Image (spheres, rainbow, N blue to C red):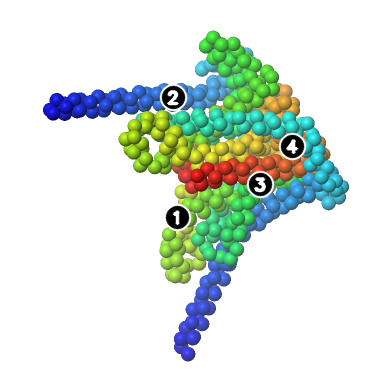
Amino acid sequence: MVEQNIIDSYDKKIKKSSIKAKRKISNAIAYIVLILGSFLMIYPFVWMLSASFSTKQYVLQTVFLPIEWDFTNYSKIISALGSPYGPGYWRSLLNTVLYSTLPVVICSIVSAMAAFAFAKIKFKGRDVMFMVLLAALMIPFPAIMMQQTYLYSKLDWLTGPWAMIVPKFFGNMMIIFFIRQYLLGMPDSLIESARIDGANYFKVFISIVMPLAMPAVIAQGLLNFMGTWNDYLGPLLFVQLRDWYPLTVSLAKYNAGIHAQHQIVMAGSVLALVPILIIFGLFQKMIIESVMLAGVKE
Amino acid sequence: MNDTALVETSKNTKKKKISSENLWGWLFIALPVFGTSFFVFFPLLMAIYASFTSWSAMVPLFDAKFVNFDNYIKFFTDEHIRETLFNTVFYMIGIPINVILSLLLAICMNRPIKFANTFRVIFYIPVVASVVSITLLFSRLFDINGVVNRFLRIFGMSEIKWSNGPAWLKKITITIMLVWKGLGGSILLFIAGLQGVNKNYFEAAKLDGAGDVKIFFKITLPQLYPVIFYIVITLFIGGAQIYTEPALFYPNAGYDVMPLVLYLYNQQFAYKAGYSAAIGIMLGIMVFIVTAIQFYINKRKSEN
């Protein structure tokens, strides 16, 4: 009897220690996989940075550090983005900033207002309109992009920055959808009590809804900002005057030109990348959480 | 007398309230409704109309000649459509690879390990990075004299003509880049899914003597189907519209690597705007049908 107990506890100990050992091994495997994967994720960026400091002869042979250093590539790309490829580096950067900041902020606010109406105001035709707008999301961009371009050209927007700016003033259905999902979880009583106190819906939106929805609005705004910053096909179609090219288009035009050199293109790629990486670094927690939330809500 | 008056006023305030809600509601959605109508639905109607004409985009749309279904007939007989559509589908072979790899990595990150958040951030960096920068970078990494081949040689393998070789290899190169760039997004969705997995069944299964692998396939994976479904759908919809990566990777691309959207684009600039519109409409219809089929399969699966 006693012996049996001893054997049992001994068995348990072995089992426990074997489970512990098993966990340790599987954790070790997880670490190895993740570290190897992280290397594969990071390495191309390291190479890009090294290549951007390399001389022309050795740029492709770069592995970790430049074989021969050349610090002039950045000043070269800054002047190379001028005619005939783009409007110059600084002007391209300014255009990119112009397209991806204020219009994105306005887009977020307009979208949040619509999201509030769709989530919390009971008005006639609400559900029908929501379905109609949702249907617009199912139309792939390439199916209508040429007609949009034609429409904008008739409005005489293509010779300026307007086609990259004005449509954003009307909000974005994807953003409306996500902020609406966020607001659905908000209790109605907050709004009702404010309404009884005599506040109109605009006041309710400004003083109650907007502060509550801020995390979702900012996260969606950041994703929209990054999407606009990185957009290529949109401005390729909608910006026809060289003066208004954003960075992506100027860089791609330079890359396709006859004077393109690897190390200079890489310097340009670094310059196009850095602002986004800084923004992502600052807001990574918010961005990652909102992406994860989007998947759960679906 | 008093009572009826009271009822009247309450009716009035109710009416007033409803009409004010109508007013505010429509006011708040007015801009998106107008924007979507004017910038999305109106161009769609234009595209549908144009797809039945021989429009060149040089004259007003209503001056274009009506050609019935000619553009659609051409779509089904055009060998370049077959090639470019095949390429677009080919680029999607990264989708199952993406799903499997990201699930594996998400499981690793979901363990109680240190730096789990750091790993998440690292894998998400390629997702936020500009497509243009990344494509220009990868076209150098996979150059015949590039660093990928250098590593292959270090490990004793012969170099591969990634972007200078046969068409399928050129496309594989782009697919590798797409998988690399897309992993981070799927990982986040899988982590969210894994955290939502109901663990109540785990103990019972363990008592029944089920191993970790069996528990994963029998309990965890079925609960992740909605996440897998979401990832596959979004990657498919994005993949059907692929344009930038092949267009930048191979600036003078022939039909052997050209995606459908680039062909559509070229048709427009070859003054065949009617045909270009028809390609766009067909693309929209194909995306819609495949998405609908996926939703149907998903629904049947979740009902079982």
- Is B25 above or below relative to A236? below
The chain identifier of the residue carrying mark 3 reads A
In the shown orientation, is residue B297 left or right of residue B199?
right
Which chain hosts label 4?
A: B
Relative to A251, A182 lies left or right:
left
User: Pointer 1: residues within 10 angstroms few (<14), some, or many (20+)?
Assistant: few
Is A150 drawn above or below residue A93 in the view shown?
A: below
Label 3, on which residue? A139
Local SS, label 1: loop
* Chain letter belonging to callout 1: A
Residue type beneath disc 4: Tyr
Looking at the picture, how far across and down is residue B271, in whole percent? Answer: 82, 39
Query: Whole-Å distance between the Cαs marked 3 and 1?
Result: 29 Å
Element carrying mark 4: helix
Mark sitting earlier along the chain (3/2): 2
Residue under numbered circle 2: A33
Q: Quadrant of residue B22?
A: bottom right
- For the point 74% across and 32% down, which residue is it? B82
Instruction: Report whether residue A278 is seen.
Output: no
Q: Chain of mark 2?
A: A
Can you give x and y, in whole percent of width and height, for residue A114 in the image? 56, 57
Mark closer to the chain start, 3 or 1: 3
**One can see residue B190 in this view:** yes
Is label 4 in contact with label 3 (beta carbons under 8 Å)?
no
Q: Say which residue label 4 marks.
A: B265
Residue drawn 57% across and 32% down?
A: B95
Which one is in front, A64 or B57? B57
Q: Amino acid at mark 3?
A: Ile
- Residue A128 on image: x %, y %: 61, 59
Q: Disc 4 or disc 3, which is closer to the eye?
A: 3
